[in-house]
Amino acid sequence: QVQLVESGGGMAQPGGSLRLSCAASGSIFRLGTMGWYRQAPGKERELVATIFSGGSTNYADSVKGRFTVSRDNAKNTVTLSMNILKPEDTAVYYCYARATTTLSTWRDYWGQGTQVTVSS
């Protein structure tokens, strides 16, 4: 099994910044894509940003130029730096990882979610 533990999040004013971090642990054999999704009240979960093991990234159009995703392969962590926050960024943010373990093939794993609220 793989556990994803998120930290960061909280409240920010419009135009402000927040940083989310996620650490993967467990019987990890290989970590593939990692990243972040979010779900606002009454909406479906949506991709925010992903980063492949080689470092290439993918962003939702709504966050391009404002959010930056990065990873530390040695520490099995992924970070989302969020700048110029907008009220519409308010959501529960979920860490995501695709991984193999000593007991299973590639699977998707999710963190428990962390609340981000942008409000004046």
Image (cartoon, helix red, strand yellow):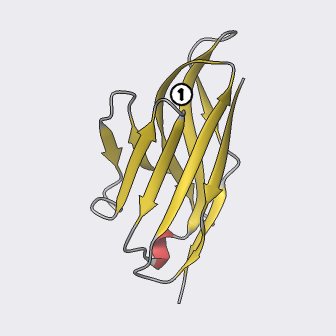
**Residue 98 placed where, x, y %?**
53, 27
Note whether 38 is above or below 104 in the view shown: below
Query: 82 or 118, which lies in front?
Result: 82
- At horizontal 29% and vertical 35% (from top left) the residue drawn is 56
Q: Is residue 45 visible?
A: no
**Residue 93 placed where, x, y %?**
58, 56
- At horizontal 43% and vertical 59% (from top left) the residue drawn is 81
Query: 44 or 25, which lies in front?
Result: 25
Q: Is residue 111 visible?
A: yes
Rendering quarter of residue 50: top left
Q: How many marks?
A: 1
Residue identifier under label 1: 98
- At horizontal 66% and vertical 53% (from top left) the residue drawn is 113
**Residue 60 placed where, x, y %?**
35, 53
Rendering quarter of residue 40: bottom right
- At horizontal 33% and vertical 65% (from top left) the residue drawn is 66
Query: 64 or 7, which lies in front?
Result: 7
Note whether 92 is above or below 74 in the view shown: below
Name the quarter where the N terminus is drawn: top right
Query: In screen coordinates, is 48 left or right of 2?
Result: left
- Inspect the image, locate mark 1, and give the three-letter code of the amino acid beneath it: Arg
Rendering quarter of residue 20: bottom right
**Residue 120 placed where, x, y %?**
53, 90
Query: In screen coordinates, is 36 left or right of 70?
Result: right
Local SS, label 1: strand
